[in-house]
């Protein structure tokens, strides 16, 4: 019985420490013009996935409990706040070219990281 308790406790700790992450599909009418659209993004939590607007700047979201998401494309970083929590951060980890109707498109993966800004 003690083994089952320890196993259940470890499983609970593992699920509560899952890091949030985000995937962004960006479309640009041209690679150099700077008017890219990153509204097609998905934010993943331990409770599900939610559509978010990942354009540069800060905004509210429909992610339950999240009060603000701020994306800084120039620096490849973002931060967000959940009600009653300190600032949490994401870093852009990968960027791959993807096909689309626009001139240039890419998909980026963002992972939760220690906030250093």
Image (cartoon, grey):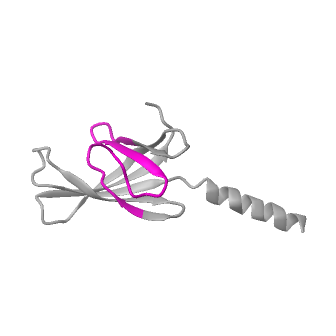
* Front position in the image: 30 or 58: 58
Task: Give 81 or 32, whichever is nearer the viewer.
Answer: 81
**Rendering quarter of residue 8:** bottom right
Residue sitting at the far top: 117
User: Residue, x 65% and y 58% (percent of image)?
Assistant: 14
x and y percentages locating residue 6 in the rendered image: 81, 61
Q: Split into 4 quadrants, where in the image is the C terminus?
A: top left
Q: Is residue 9 above or below residue 81?
A: below
Q: Is residue 29 above or below residue 101?
A: above
Position of residue 41 measured from the top left corner of the image (x, y, whole percent): 32, 58
Q: Residue at x 14, y 44 (%)?
A: 34
Residue 57 falls inside the magenta stretch = yes
Q: Is residue 63 left or right of residue 105?
A: right
In the drawing, does residue 47 fall left or right of residue 28? right
Horizontal side of 16 relative to 107 (left or right) equals right
Residue 53 is inside the magenta segment: yes
Magenta residues, start to end: 50-78
Residue 16 placement (x, y as % from top left): 63, 56
Which of 4 and 31 lies nearest the eye of the viewer?
4
In percent of width and height, residue 30 lies at 9, 51
């Amino acid at each position: 019985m003690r083994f089952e308790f320890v196993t259940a406790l470890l499983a609970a700790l593992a699920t509560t420490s899952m890091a949030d992450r985000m995937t962004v599909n960006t479309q640009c009418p041209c690679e150099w013009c700077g008017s890219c659209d990153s509204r097609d993004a998905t934010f993943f939590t331990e409770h599900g996935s939610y559509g978010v607007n990942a354009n540069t700047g800060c905004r509210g979201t429909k992610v339950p409990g999240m009060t603000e998401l701020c994306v800084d494309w120039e620096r490849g970083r973002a931060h967000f706040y959940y009600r009653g929590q300190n600032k949490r951060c994401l870093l852009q980890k990968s960027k791959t070219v993807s096909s689309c109707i626009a001139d240039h498109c890419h998909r980026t993966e963002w992972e939760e990281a220690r906030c250093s800004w």
